[in-house]
Each structure stands twice: as C-alpha cells, then as structure tokens.
Amino acid sequence: MEAQRMLSGFCPNPVIPSIQNTEKPIFATVPSPPSCSFVQSRNWVCHRAFVSISKRTRPRKRIECRNNGAEVVDVTSGEDLTSGVRRKKLAVFVSGGGSNFRSIHEASLRGSIHGDIVVLVTNKLGCGGALYARGMGIPVVLFPKTKDEPDGLSPTSLLATLRKFEVDFIFLAGYLKLIPVELIRAYPKSIVNIHPSLLPAFGGKGYYGMKVHKAVIASGARFSGPTIHFVDEHYDTGRILAQSVVPVLPHDTAEGLAARVLHEEHSLYVEAAAALCDERIIWRQDGVPLFRSKETPMNTVNRITCTFCFL
C-alpha cells in the first residue's frame, strides 16, 4: 500500500502489479544528489527509482509512467532483452589516457555490454589509450593523416578500415579531432561522444579537458556533469542521449570537479554502450533518443525499475 500511495503521488491512475507472498515489505527509493542520472528534454525529466522484492516473487514487472503523466504501461520484463540480438562490434576513438575506453572494455569482458571492441582509433600512437589497447591485443589505427603523422589514414581509408572490422558503433572517448563528414554519413545514429559538462552549456570547439571545468567554476554554475550525445558534423551539438548531475562545491577546484565528473562518466558511458548494443535506444517522434529500461538481477534480489516522469 505504501508503494501504491507513492506511485499515485507521481502518476495519475497508476497501474500497480499485484505482488503477493513477499518475504519482505516492498520499498521504493529515489536516487538523491549528488549523482542522479536523468534524461531531460523540453519540460520533463525522467527519474529512475527501484522497488526491490524477494526472489520468490513472480512475475517480475516494470512500471513506466510516460511523459504525459497519464499513460502508464505495465510490462513483464523477466525475459532476456539481449536474446536474439547479435553481439555488436565496437570501435573506440581516443586521444589521451582512455579511462572511458578502459571502462567500456572491462564492462565488455565481464559481460555487462553485449559487444566487443575490435579496433582503437587514435591521433596519438603514444597515448595511454593506445598503449592499453596494444597490451590487450586490440588493433590500433592512426587517424588522421597530417604533416606530423604522414602514416595516418585518410577519411576514406579510415572508413574502409572500419568496414573491414565490421564496426557497428563508434564511441568517442576523449578524442579531440572533428569526425569527418564521410564517417558521420556512413554511421547515422551510431557514433556517440561523452563530454564533461551538461550540454549545451560549456560545449563546442575549444571546450575540452580541464578548460571545461575551469569555465564551469568561473561561471558560478551550481551543477555540472557528463553528457553522452550522438555525433553530428559539429562539436558537441548532436542529440543528447543521457546526462548525470554532479554538484559544484562552494570552494571547488577544477581538479576536484574533474575527478567527480570523470567518476560519473565511467558508469554512464557503460550504461549507454550497453543500451546501444542491446538495441534499447528508442527515438521519439521529435528526434530525441531515449533509453528503454532493462531489469537486471542483483545478488538474490530482483529489481523492478520504475521510471517517473515529471511535467
């Protein structure tokens, strides 16, 4: 009953699945700052909460409150959403240490992502990301071709290389070069980037690394955090897929803020990569991409994912 009253406060006429013979009372918790993941568009925000029930309870359900505040869908989600979905082949682009690249690779190895990194692309062969890739047996490709790097690939050669590896998705993980238009057209809705601010604020050409965090603090902004977005022909202007909020502290430093944002980046990028590989990204009619929730077991407890959408 407590769960019903809580849900009815968020959504009119909620549909609550009947749950009987549970070993423990049902409870619901809403993630609180400083790290509350959300997807925001126009005048609504989706917050995710979890209702935990005993392993003995069947069937497992997901309750979704749609953004119009009136439509509620009760979906049985005990099935494996990756069943029948082909394992994807991934390319990652890096220019530096590649900590997000490592997070995605490690998640792939432990089975959290239904895909494998088959090639790494970099403009700096000596960067940490490239060294890690070689150590893990992942092929490394130099791009672009420049006066200082004459052995780098041209856009046409890079596209041919990615097709040779049968790449499905491209993840930019601290890659500082503009992606050529040939690649964007060849991989529509299949190239994503992570940026260390809440776009569209503090994005665009020249906003990267510590420059972003210094600008955030200097502006007096109270919140920052990573943004994952699809890539278009310009810097940081593609459709936003996901964001995670990190507070800016009263006496914050760029280094301290950067460390907290990076911590959120690692988990958020893995979540986005998993959703892409599971084919759980859906597109609204106005072109906004959204996650489709996936229920995952935690130890001996089943989780019911509730998405509350506030107008």
Image (cartoon, helix red, strand yellow):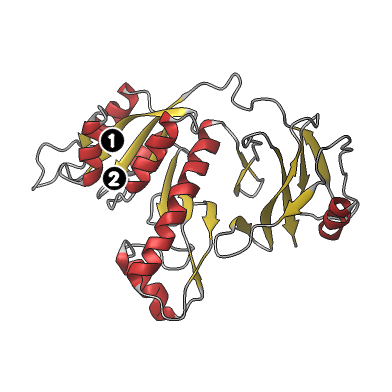
Q: Quadrant of residue 261?
A: bottom left
Residue 85 rendering spot, x and y as whole percentages: 56, 22
In the rendered image of this protein, does residue 267 appear above or below residue 152? below
Along the polypeptide, which appears first: circle 2 or circle 1?
A: 2
Residue at 59 percent of width and 18 percent of height? 84
Closest to the observer, 100 or 50: 50
Badge 2 amino acid: Val
Residue 120: numbered disc: 1
Q: Quadrant of residue 40?
A: bottom right
In the rendered image of this protein, does residue 104 appear above or below residue 167? below
Q: Quadrant of the C terminus?
A: bottom right
Closest to the observer, 116 or 177: 116
Dot 2: few (<14), some (14–19), or many (≥20) neighbours within 10 Å? Answer: many
Residue 200 rendering spot, x and y as whole percentages: 48, 64
Residue 217 rendering spot, x and y as whole percentages: 40, 76
Residue at 25 percent of width and 27 percent of height? 137
Of all residues shown, which one is farthest toward the front? 23
Residue at 47 percent of width and 55 percent of height? 264
Question: How many marks are shown on the rendered structure?
Answer: 2
Q: Which residue is mark 2?
A: 94
Q: Is residue 58 visible?
A: yes
Secondary structure of the residue carrying tag 1 is strand
Q: CA–CA distance between discs 2 and 1?
A: 8 Å
Q: Quadrant of residue 91?
A: top left
Closest to the observer, 154 or 78: 78
Residue at 83 percent of width and 48 percent of height? 71
Q: Are marks 2 and 1 in contact (CB under 8 Å)?
A: yes
From the viewer's perspective, tell me whether residue 118 is left or right of residue 239: left
Residue 293: numbered disc: none
Badge 1 amino acid: Leu
From the viewer's perspective, tell me whether residue 54 is left or right of residue 230: right
